Image: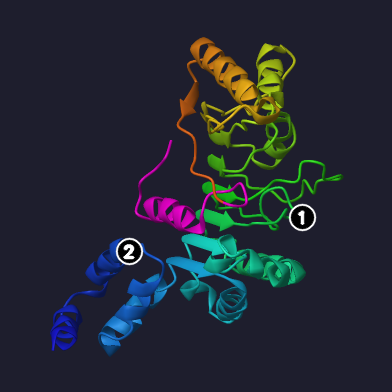
Amino acid sequence: MMIRLQGVIMDRCPAEICSEIYAFACIDDGRTGRALSLVSRYTRQTSKPFKLQSVSVIGYNQLFAFADLVENTPLPLRQVRCIFISAHPRQTASDPKALTPEYARRQQAYAAVGRILQAISSCVKVVHAFFIFYRPFPLLPVSLPALEELTVHGPTETSMIGMDESIQFTKLRHLHLTSFCSPSYILGSVSKLTPSLAHLRLSAPEHSINFVVELQSILENSTSVLPIDLQRIYIHLPTEPKDNLMGMLDTYRTTVSALNSIANSHDWIILLPPLRLGMFRTISIQDAEDSWSRSASGISWW
């Protein structure tokens, strides 16, 4: 009865007002867009352009199903603005037994990720991507000219030779990499793909002082060229080790002390609390989804 009553009310609204309502309502993982299709014929038709506005695609099967869907959806109805995309199902991040099959088909999963992003490249503005294994691309596998915010979970392969600089994110302003990565690699190489970068968010490791050594070198070197629009660098402090096994506690204290010194000298470098890391030295997929949900609802981290 409630669905039928809602349908009657919505059917009396002008399409322009309905569009405003749909735009505000469709900011979850896609369930609202699908539910609107069940309200009435009028609502189904008028909500079509917003049905895919915000979606979450998780795991191998969903990747291929959604790739087929968006590739066969007319461009005016393929308006994905915000997407969470995971190359792995939820249980992979917590069940070691799931690793072997996931690793064996990782290339197919990456290919499906590429298909999806290519299909929505002209419109997507917010992407949060979750990977457990090293990925064969620095950020994402295709250019996204409209992208403004990107969060990538998972290890970054900094030894890649011949990075494809034709893959560009020209409007990207906000970049968050949750796994440990080299400041020199990000600011020296990856930044060539993100010429409009304004806010960068990184994580410092507790097991190596190389992160702060590289960062200090960049800041103290007058010839270092930072992205021209860069306004802030946010750095998550490392997690404090439980003991001093292999000198990790000493390294942690040295790293934190150096980071505090850097932040005191550069007010545009902001220190943040440690991230909660899981089994594979990355955040859990649940925390990754929560972060994406906040972005989808308009809550920014910068």
- Percent position (x, y) of residue 141? 70, 57
Look at the image and tell me whether residue 46 can be seen: no
- Label 2 belongs to which residue? 23
- Give the number of the mark in front: 2 or 1: 1
Residue type pointed to by label 1: Pro
In what element is the residue under mark 2?
Answer: helix
Q: Quadrant of residue 250?
A: top right
Tell me the magenta residue range: 279-302
Q: Residue at x 81, y 46 (%)?
A: 163
In what element is the residue under mark 1?
Answer: loop
- Percent position (x, y) of residue 233? 54, 28
- Percent position (x, y) of residue 247? 68, 25
* 147 displayed left or right of 217: left
- Label 1 belongs to which residue? 136
Query: Is 200 located above or below residue 116 in the figure?
Result: above
* Label 2 environment density (alpha carbons within 10 Å; few <14, some 14–19, many ≥20): some
